[in-house]
Amino acid sequence: MSDTREFVHTIDARDVIVEVNDAWRQFACESDAGELPERALGAVLWDHISDFETVYLYQAMVRIVREQGRRLKADYRCDSPRLRRFLCMEIVAMPERAVRFVSRVVKIEEREAEPLLDAHAARADWLLKMCSWCRKVLVGENDWREVEEAVRLLGFFQREPLPAITHSMCPVCYERVMSQLR
Ligand SMILES: [Zn+2]
């Protein structure tokens, strides 16, 4: 399986999303993130990101791109219940302090549908922490696992409904992004 599309979104000097391409719109629908693509345009980028560590690092990356004109790259996952999608995002300076984000799919793997990633599944009021970047799930103290492993270890299926998911950043991803910023 492959996907050669480029997913593009651009923010202006005030960090407002001023452009998304058609592939980005489609992808937002496919990833079932519960996010309506037409709402993204005109909104401040940070309002779309729920965890504050990711916002902090994203803002640091954008600052470096703007001020030093450097191109930065970040690997991340954007999974759906049936697909593991590995993406790489490039962050590029544009005229007038605008910044463009271009994501490309590096690899796609199919899997058995994973209900935990279904945005429409009913949720309990207890929370599970997921890394916004690699999509691993925190199962114990500092123990981050792939979703399937986490489901097996925590034995969710005896505990309906599924937990709600809150986003955070695992130490491996935090370190990988930070090392580019130094
Ligand atoms: Zn991670």
Image: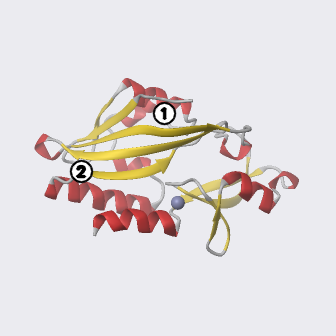
The picture places residue 69, in percent across and down from the top left corner, at: 15, 52
Left or right of 30 in this view: 106 = left
Left or right of 87 in this view: 182 = left
Instruction: Tell me the SS state at disc 1.
Output: helix
Of all residues shown, which one is farthest toward the bottom?
Answer: 141
Q: Quadrant of the C terminus?
A: bottom left
Is the CB of the residue bearing disc 2 within 8 angstroms of ligand 1?
no
Residue labelled with disc 2: 71
Structural distance between the alpha carbons of marks 2 and 1: 24 Å
Amino acid marked by disc 1: Ala
Amino acid marked by disc 2: Arg
Viewer-closest of 26 and 1 = 1
Residue labelled with disc 1: 28
Of all residues shown, which one is farthest toward the right?
Answer: 158
Residue located at (17% from left, 42% from top): 94
The picture places residue 1, in percent across and down from the top left corner, at: 57, 29
Q: Residues within 10 Å of mark 1 (few under 14, many from 20)?
A: some
Q: What's the image's color scheme?
A: secondary structure
Viewer-closest of 108 and 12 = 108
Residue 154's image quarter?
A: bottom right
State which tag comes first along the sequence, 2 or 1. Answer: 1
